[in-house]
């Protein structure tokens, strides 16, 4: 018998609508779990002190027959999303006391759908990282083994979901920041196509790749939240006007007619055999369900690292220029080491005399990568591989490394800079730690990859 | 050809980035930035002579809106000033660093 905080979004909604339990009860169970475990895991920066009140309001609406999709469901939100009335810090001392005066569009949509905001989750400061260790407020720990990291930068959201401190969570991905912590924490992560979900009110990292997305306990939960947050937003000029296609989750488990490409370049020479075997096992499983699985060759990850590092850090240097302490926040002396490192690299690569050699060159290689994927998707419907080179690393692994984040995300950077969509779904364990499989599709093919992900999740 | 960064390069970049660095920080960053630049310089190996830059990832372009006020997206003056302490505000204005040195300008 599951405890209320262990439920999925789907189970919570069903239970609330049929009167089995109340939103106040679910919310209280989540808050209890946070109280019990968060001293050790540190997934949250701020817990919403009005959560129970909000849940009680939701309960009244439920009784009155409201059909809001996420009514009464407690969700945790990464601390880079602006939330009115709840401090928002991007896990940085610069914004240690920042109180937003408007909600991010994603937050507004979740509220309109009736979700309860449980709190703001810990992240790498400014989303600069793949470990959550660069948070100015202390690292988050992995619920599967607290000597290990949860991944990042949406580490708090991933850990909170894995530890059942919430029913689901919101994160955002610049390259890996939803999928990698999802993989390290054994939950489902969805990185939507760039422009599919509004970036308005999300503290910017790299404006040409940032993609808000859900972290959840099941693929169907992730799709449900995706359906709420996706869509055009006039406040985000880069958001797409294409209609949001929902996934048809019929009980049919066949992958007949689906073509899947196993990316050979993602089976890195340094990758452990047991991780490679889990990926090959997944490929065989897709075959057994009727999919045509072939080996595909893509531009090697080492070039994606270069492209991503330059473009991301350049855009970071520009986006963090606004933090001058004059209109909000503390001054620039409050930036941590990783932020300084990235601002400096980005300023250099954009500067006169170096712009062509670095930024312009990176944008050209980016075009090569976009074309590489376009060609691949004429032959397959989705590509698969590991999300991360290995399982969750131990605490301290990211210290004193000039490019830790970019190195850890080498298997997901190409798809991020090409603006593609992708999921991370749990595919097994090594050393007691989860491994995530990436199922990556062409732009605006979320329904296709979510369908494949759902079938895999339920039949593996 | 390996990239080499000097402390002068670091100090110039820090000035552009409006970051103040201690001597030890500058030296530490010098080494790390040099290492990173050498890693990303791998891109030089790829032939991009036939490619124009991908400054756009999706087909969205030239997104315009009407030149009209959207009241739903306005902050009141009070809201706009709410994240700055009283001693950094003046009669409803943000206080900023002086742009001109000469007070008579």
Image (tube, coloured by chain):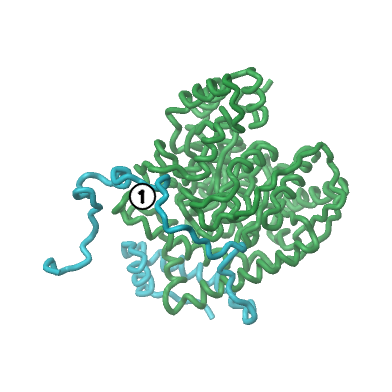
Chain colours: A green, B cyan
Instruction: Tell me, yes or no, if residue B87 can be seen here.
Output: yes
Seen from the viewer's position, the closer of residues A272 and A23 is A23
Q: Is residue A399 above or below residue A27?
A: below
Residue at coordinates 33% horizontally, 64% vertically from top-left? B18
Quarter of the figure with residue A415: bottom right
* SS class, disc 1: helix
Would residue A178 appear left or right of A53 to someone viewing this image? right
| Chain under disc 1 | A
Would residue B24 appear left or right of A139 to someone viewing this image? left
Residue at coordinates 70% horizontally, 38% vertically from top-left? A220
Quarter occupied by the N terminus of chain A: top right
Q: Is residue A307 above or below residue A108?
A: below
Q: Position of residue A439 (x, y in %)?
A: 72, 51
Instruction: Tell me, yes or no, if residue A29 can be seen here.
Output: no
Q: Which residue is mark 1?
A: A94
Quarter occupied by the C terminus of chain A: top right
Q: Position of residue A226 (x, y in %)?
A: 63, 43
Q: Position of residue A347 (x, y in %)?
A: 42, 68
Q: Is residue A329 above or below residue A344?
A: above
Would residue A205 appear left or right of A298 to someone viewing this image? left
Residue at coordinates 48% horizontally, 42% vertically from top-left? A122
Q: Position of residue B11 (x, y in %)?
A: 34, 70
């Amino acid at each position: 018998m599951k405890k209320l905080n262990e439920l999925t979004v789907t189970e919570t909604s069903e239970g609330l609508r049929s009167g089995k339990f109340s939103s106040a009860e679910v919310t209280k169970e989540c808050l209890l779990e946070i109280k019990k475990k968060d001293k050790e895991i540190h997934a949250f920066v701020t817990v919403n002190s009005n959560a129970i009140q909000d849940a009680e309001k939701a309960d009244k609406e439920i009784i009155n027959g409201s059909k809001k999709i996420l009514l009464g469901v407690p969700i945790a939100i990464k601390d880079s999303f602006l939330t009115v009335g709840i401090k928002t810090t991007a896990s940085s001392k610069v914004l240690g006391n920042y109180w937003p005066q408007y909600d991010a569009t994603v937050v507004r949509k979740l509220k309109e759908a009736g979700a309860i905001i449980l709190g703001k989750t810990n992240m790498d400061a400014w989303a600069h990282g793949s470990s959550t260790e660069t948070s100015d407020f202390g690292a988050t720990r992995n619920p599967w083994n607290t000597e290990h990291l949860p991944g990042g930068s949406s580490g708090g959201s991933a850990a909170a979901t894995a530890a059942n401190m919430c029913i689901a969570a919101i994160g955002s991905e610049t390259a890996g920041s939803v999928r990698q912590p999802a993989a390290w924490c054994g939950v489902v992560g969805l990185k939507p196509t760039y422009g599919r979900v509004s970036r308005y009110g999300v503290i910017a990292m790299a404006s040409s790749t940032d993609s808000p997305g859900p972290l959840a306990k099941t693929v169907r939960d992730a799709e449900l939240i995706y359906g709420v947050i996706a869509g055009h937003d006039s406040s985000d000029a880069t958001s797409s006007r294409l209609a949001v296609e929902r996934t048809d989750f019929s009980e049919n488990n066949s992958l007949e007619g689906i073509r899947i490409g196993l990316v050979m370049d993602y089976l890195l020479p340094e990758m452990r055999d047991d991780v490679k075997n889990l990926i090959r096992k997944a490929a065989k499983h897709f075959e057994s369900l009727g999919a045509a699985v072939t080996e595909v060759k893509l531009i090697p990850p080492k070039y994606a690292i270069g492209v991503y590092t330059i473009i991301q850090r350049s855009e970071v240097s520009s986006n963090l220029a606004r933090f001058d302490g004059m209109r909000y926040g503390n001054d620039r002396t409050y930036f941590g080491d990783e932020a300084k490192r990235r601002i400096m690299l980005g300023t250099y690569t954009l500067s006169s005399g170096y712009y062509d050699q670095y930024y312009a060159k990176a944008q050209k290689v980016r075009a090569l990568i976009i074309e590489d994927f376009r060609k691949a998707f004429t032959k397959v419907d989705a590509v698969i591989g590991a999300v991360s080179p290995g399982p969750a690393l131990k605490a301290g692994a990211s210290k004193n490394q000039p490019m830790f984040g970019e190195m850890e995300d080498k298997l997901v950077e190409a798809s991020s800079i090409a603006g593609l969509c992708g999921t991370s779904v749990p595919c097994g364990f090594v050393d007691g730690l989860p491994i995530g499989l990436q199922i990556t599709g062409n732009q605006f093919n979320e329904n296709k990859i979510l369908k494949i992900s759902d079938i895999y999740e339920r039949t593996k | 050809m390996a990239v080499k960064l000097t402390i002068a390069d670091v100090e110039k970049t820090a000035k552009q980035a409006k970051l103040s660095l201690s001597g030890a920080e500058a030296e530490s960053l010098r080494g790390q930035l040099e290492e990173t630049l050498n890693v990303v310089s791998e891109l030089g190996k790829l032939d991009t002579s036939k490619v124009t830059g991908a400054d756009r990832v999706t087909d969205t372009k030239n997104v315009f809106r009407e030149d009209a006020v959207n009241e739903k997206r306005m902050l009141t003056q009070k809201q706009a000033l709410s994240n700055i302490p009283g001693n950094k505000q003046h009669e409803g204005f943000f206080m900023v660093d002086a742009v001109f040195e000469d007070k008579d300008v």
